[in-house]
Image (tube, helix red, strand yellow):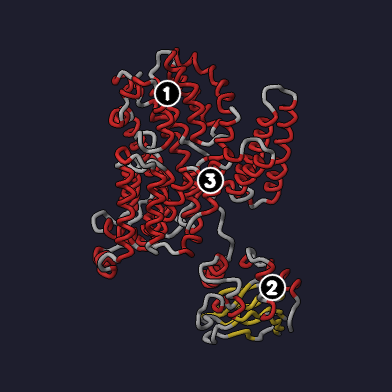
Amino acid sequence: MAIDLKQMAQELRRAPILSDCSVQELARVVPYAVEHFLESGQALFQSGNPALTLYFVRRGKVQLWAGGRVIAEVEHGFVGEEAAVSSDYYMADAIAVDNTEVIALPREAITKVAGAGTPTIDRFYASLLSHYSGQPNRELESRSPISQLKRNDWVQSCGWILSVVIPGILYLILRETAEFDWNSQMFLIVLTSTIVMWVFGMVPEFIPGLFCILSLLILDIAPSEVILSGFASGSFFMALSLFGLGAVLMGSGLTYRLVLWLSRFIPKTESWYATALFLTGLAMTPILPSANGRIGLLSPILTDTIDATGVKPGGKAASHLAFAAFSGASLLSHVFLSSKSANFVVYGLLPLQVQQQFSWVYWLQASLVVGIVTLVLYFISTKFLFSNNQAFEISQQQVEAQVETLGPLSSQEWISLVSTIVLLLGIVTASIHKIQLPWIGLGVLFLVLSLGILKKNEFRTQIDWPFLILLGSLVGIAEAMSYLGLDTHFGGYLTWLSDSMKSNFPLFIFLLSLTILAVRFVIPNTTAVAIFATILIPMAESNGVNPWIVGAIILNISDAWFFPYQCSYYLQFQELLDKQQLFNERLILRGNFLATLIRFFSIYLSLGYFRTLGIL
């Protein structure tokens, strides 16, 4: 008995497994759907029968029998998932307990909504396994505190309401003051709404960014070339290039070979592998002046490490490896002059004689104790956060057999290796050839595309376009803020820090850190650095304080964050790995909070060293 489209969609869309399927997708299944009625005790299918049909229990109850016992009872859910996951035979007997109605969907119908590699097919696998594990088939628990709140409809509704109410209240306040012109008022109102959307996480992060850019363009708050400058910026093309190179490295198998090579020499334990990933990221830090770039290169290495070691994705050990890779790529960016663009912002604002003093080597020397203290506290905190030191079940014989199976480097691996070396050589020799890093990266991307290593379809699917939209939006928002003069305007409110800078420097560090952390809730990292450095570096010089130490504090603390939207390279890390559910985000965010405390204490514990160098 066939059922109509409306009834079909209503019945099936209630099932969590098909919750992401559109009505159009479900409509394609309709011609295949047939309704069956079973009496109590009647068999729906038996173990060993060809698995050709998936069944959805509409009413009644179906018991699954295996090994002479009931392994599961299903009401208003699926049985016969073997058909959905392309298994040849059913693994259990399905018996109706009461008078039961089911919707039968043949295998060819399921392929229309559950193709290979889709979340739906993964849910069918999870549903099938849940019958045999004795555990109910639940949606994966959300690991982000904000994501958990999103599961509550009332919280999400409050977020949407606040995204309108708070900007409305701000408009009423700004209308009564003459402090801002109309364009600045509208910018602040739009930005406030955008931030509320980010904080509540009601939609993917790139959508509020797109909303902000679109609103600024429609309201003509700044020239379009300013608002859209992020999509023509070097950081945009650098991220695009590194996404492409990361896809090539992953697809070629070169990173997997690297992981196996490391496995030959390091002990097969969680802490050693985590240390190796951390040091790999740290080694990239002075060479690759982009946290996003380092994350892009490390992500495939991390993915292959988790795969090679056989640790449970999303478990504590996998989260430890992920946190180590992320921290190695980002925790010590302030220690090396060449590690990020914001460092050059501060360097460019230093007086000429201070610039001459703080060469690359002396910058590292001055930051040495801060870096060492950060490293020590990092390893102590990870010991506390990830208390278990899991031994990986990888024998040396197994590793050698895997290496032997891979054989010599393939042509694709050679091209991937050469492309990576060209990129790194271009970065190291930038002072000689004067070519900016983004264009070196774009040249490498052109190389892998023109040689056919990265195919057209892979370029479309492997590049994280939502993140690139978010990155372009963030840069455009920062540029629009600068165009309107709001960065300078808000910087004027920082003059109260002058007294503590001169009379009580430890208090100044505390107050400055709190102010930066507060401002970072609403302003991107590089913009925050530019605002604080523009105001405080000249202030330090006038108060007889070495401007470099003030700039170093700004760079260190401005890298701290609490919510994912505050950190573009974490969003990239999240997009690259969290969609594969490789780590527990709650553990990562907890570790990030400890990293924020580490940044704070590393400055205080280095004050004596600064005095020894004569910096303070």
User: Element at badge 1?
Assistant: helix
Vertical position of residue 142 compared to residue 495: above or below: below
Q: Is residue 134 left or right of residue 598?
A: right
Asked if labels 3 and 2 touch by Cβ distance under 8 angstroms, the answer is no
Provide the residue designation for mark 3: 231
**Marks 2/3: CA distance?**
38 Å
Vertical position of residue 501 compared to residue 420: above or below: above
Provide the residue designation for mark 2: 27
Mark 2: amino acid: Ala
Vertical position of residue 423 compared to residue 43: above or below: above
Nearer the camera: disc 3 or disc 1: 3
Q: Is residue 49 left or right of residue 270?
A: right
Mark 1: amino acid: Val
Q: Is residue 134 visible?
A: no
Mark 3: amino acid: Phe
Of the numbered discs in the image, which one, if any, rests on residue 71? none
* Quadrant placement of the N terminus: bottom right
Within 10 Å of the Cα at label 2, are there few (<14), some (14-19), or many (20+) other Cα atoms? some
Front position in the image: 35 or 537: 537
- State which quadrant residue 180 falls in: top right
Asked if labels 2 and 1 touch by Cβ distance under 8 angstroms, the answer is no
Residue 35, image x, y percentages: 71, 81
Provide the residue designation for mark 1: 550
